């Protein structure tokens, strides 16, 4: 007879599981969707993603939604339209990658956790010296840094550093 041990459900286990679910749903999916919605509903339709939307046959419906939201766009501050999505996407990435690594940061996974933030920050800085195209923006840089840093504040109770 094979004896299997089931983990005991404790208040701590349930709380930890709920924290992981919140990290996935709010930290990752909600932030990803909010950043995407800003682009889809308020940014220029010259972006490549609008060709994909046209390809799947959703352009007409999206255009109607964008026309309905046009008055709202007029009152949204520029930093929300142009910088906030970067921070939201970075927060989303950090939430997901930390969750994938079970909120443990070790010398084995630190590169995987920070490679995308490093590339994003580097690309913004390289715009200053015109190595890559684009316009350097301090606010974009600040949003990237907030997107990287805030998950560490929100999930500090569950993050473990094992860098030895």
Image (tube, rainbow, N blue to C red):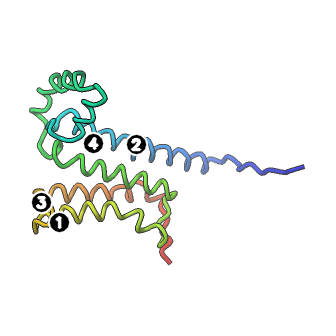
Classed neighbour count for the residue bearing mark 1: other residues with Cα under 10 Å, few (<14), some (14–19), many (≥20): some
46 w.r.t. 146: above or below: above
Find out whether the residues at labels 4 and 2 contact each other: C-beta distance under 8 Å.
no
Q: Which residue corresponds to mark 4? A: 35
The tag earlier along the polypeptide, 4 or 1, is 4
* Mark 4 and mark 2: Cα distance apart in space: 13 Å
Label 4 residue SS: helix
Is 164 displayed left or right of 138 in the figure?
right
Q: Which residue corresponds to mark 2? A: 26
- Between circles 3 and 2, the one closer to the viewer is 3
> Which quadrant of the figure has residue 40?
top left
Q: Which residue corresponds to mark 1? A: 125
Find out whether the residues at labels 3 and 1 contact each other: C-beta distance under 8 Å.
yes
- Between circles 4 and 2, the one closer to the viewer is 4
Q: Point out residue 119 in the picture as x, y percentages from the top left corner.
A: 28, 63
Find out whether the residues at labels 4 and 1 contact each other: C-beta distance under 8 Å.
no
* Mark 1 and mark 2: Cα distance apart in space: 29 Å
Numbered circle sitting on residue 136: 3
Numbered circle sitting on residue 41: none
Is 30 displayed left or right of 10 in the figure?
left
* Mark 3 and mark 1: Cα distance apart in space: 7 Å
Label 1 residue SS: helix
Residue at image coords 32%, 59%: 148
- Between circles 1 and 2, the one closer to the viewer is 1
């Amino acid at each position: 007879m094979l004896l299997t041990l089931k983990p005991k459900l404790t208040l701590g286990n349930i709380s930890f599981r709920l924290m992981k679910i919140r990290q996935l749903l709010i930290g990752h999916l909600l932030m990803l969707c909010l950043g995407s919605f800003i682009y889809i509903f308020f940014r220029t339709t010259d972006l490549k993603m609008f060709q994909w939307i046209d390809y799947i046959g959703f352009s007409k419906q999206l255009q109607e939604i964008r026309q309905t939201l046009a008055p709202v766009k007029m009152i949204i501050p520029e930093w929300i339209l142009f910088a906030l999505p970067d921070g939201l996407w970075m927060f989303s990435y950090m939430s997901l990658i930390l969750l994938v690594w079970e909120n443990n940061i070790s010398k084995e996974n630190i590169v995987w956790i920070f490679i995308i933030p490093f590339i994003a920050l580097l690309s913004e800085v390289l715009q200053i010296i015109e190595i890559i195209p684009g316009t350097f923006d301090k606010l974009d840089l600040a949003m990237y840094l907030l997107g990287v840093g805030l998950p560490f504040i929100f999930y500090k109770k569950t993050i473990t550093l094992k860098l030895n």
